[in-house]
Image: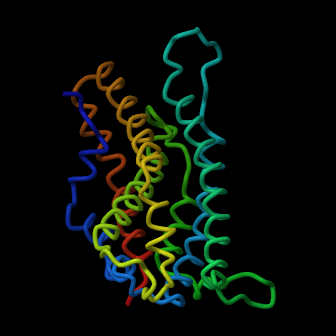
């Protein structure tokens, strides 16, 4: 069986991963007990998260290097595959933001945080997790001294998507058989959001980035030897912990 860096990350700190993907907020949302106000404030933070996510992708795009020549029916390489994933991510995230706004309006949920006179949301108004994510995406840069200089950035993006998928899959497992008519959010999570955040297409999207990372790592292991595995893991371990801490802090305290 080939080596999987992403799987090694997943099992490297199981308790931290559990904290990042199983919160009281998620349990409330899954039980239909998250109020419109609580859900709205989280969605408002998530919408601002989208903006920093996009800016981080812009930084990642700025330093990806692509092959100067191509051959038909030949593997295009990791950076070209990563480019395709980024394009899909930008399309998906824009659609997601519109979905947030339209669905929230349908259910009477406010997804705007308080702003100052300049129309901007003050940092103190944001969730701690959002501030952490903004800092993480602002830190996206190439590791120019190493092979796969994009690896740390890719792990950040795979990490956030994987945590999000597993978190809402866990919340979905909390759902009862109710029709949602008595849910505190009017049924928004049950009927709209949770299926969108756990759908087959999203699973495939997350898995694709994991494959890009693992395939590139395995190719490097084949070229450089088994010792590369531990070196690569150590390179990204810190970013992985940053992701888990940001994700844990992104769920509102209830």
Q: Quadrant of the C terminus?
A: bottom left
7 versus 113 height, above or below: above
138 versus 38 height, above or below: above
Q: Which of 37 and 20 lies nearest the eye of the viewer?
A: 37
In the rendered image, residue 67, in percent from the top left (x then y), is placed at 60, 20
Q: Quadrant of the N terminus?
A: top left
In the rendered image, residue 236, in percent from the top left (x then y), is placed at 36, 49
- Relative to 52, is 213 on the left or the right? left
Q: Which of 91 and 159 lies nearest the eye of the viewer?
A: 91
203 versus 148 height, above or below: below
**Colouring:** rainbow
- Relative to 103, is 15 on the left or the right? left
Q: Quadrant of residue 165?
A: bottom left
In the rendered image, residue 237, in percent from the top left (x then y), is placed at 32, 52
Q: Which of 21 and 34 lies nearest the eye of the viewer?
A: 34
- Relative to 146, is 4 on the left or the right? left
- Residue drawn at point x = 34 percent, y = 60 percent: 166
- Residue drawn at point x = 35 percent, y = 76 percent: 30
- Residue drawn at point x = 64 percent, y = 85 percent: 113
167 versus 118 height, above or below: above
Q: Extreme right residue here?
A: 118
């Amino acid at each position: 069986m080939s080596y999987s860096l992403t799987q090694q990350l997943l099992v490297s700190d199981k308790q931290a991963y559990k904290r990042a993907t199983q919160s009281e907020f998620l349990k409330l949302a899954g039980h239909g007990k998250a109020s419109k106000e609580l859900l709205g404030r989280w969605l408002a933070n998530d919408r601002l998260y989208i903006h920093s996510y996009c800016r981080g992708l812009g930084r990642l795009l700025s330093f990806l290097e692509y092959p100067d020549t191509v051959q038909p029916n030949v593997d295009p390489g990791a950076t070209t595959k990563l480019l395709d994933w980024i394009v899909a991510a930008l399309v998906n995230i824009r659609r997601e933001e519109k979905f947030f706004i339209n669905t929230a309006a349908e259910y009477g949920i406010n997804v705007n945080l308080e702003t100052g006179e300049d129309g901007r949301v003050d940092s103190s108004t944001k969730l701690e997790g959002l501030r952490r994510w903004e800092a993480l995406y602002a830190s996206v840069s190439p590791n120019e001294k190493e092979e796969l200089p994009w690896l740390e950035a890719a792990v950040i993006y795979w990490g956030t998507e994987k945590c999000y998928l597993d978190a809402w899959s866990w919340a979905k497992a909390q759902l009862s058989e109710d029709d949602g008519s008595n849910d505190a959010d009017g049924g928004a999570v049950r009927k709209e959001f949770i299926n969108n955040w756990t759908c087959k297409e999203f699973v495939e999207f997350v898995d694709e980035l994991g494959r890009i990372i693992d395939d590139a790592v395995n190719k490097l292991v084949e070229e450089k030897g088994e010792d590369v595995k531990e070196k690569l893991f150590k390179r990204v371990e810190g970013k992985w912990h940053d992701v888990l801490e940001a994700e844990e802090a992104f769920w509102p305290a209830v």
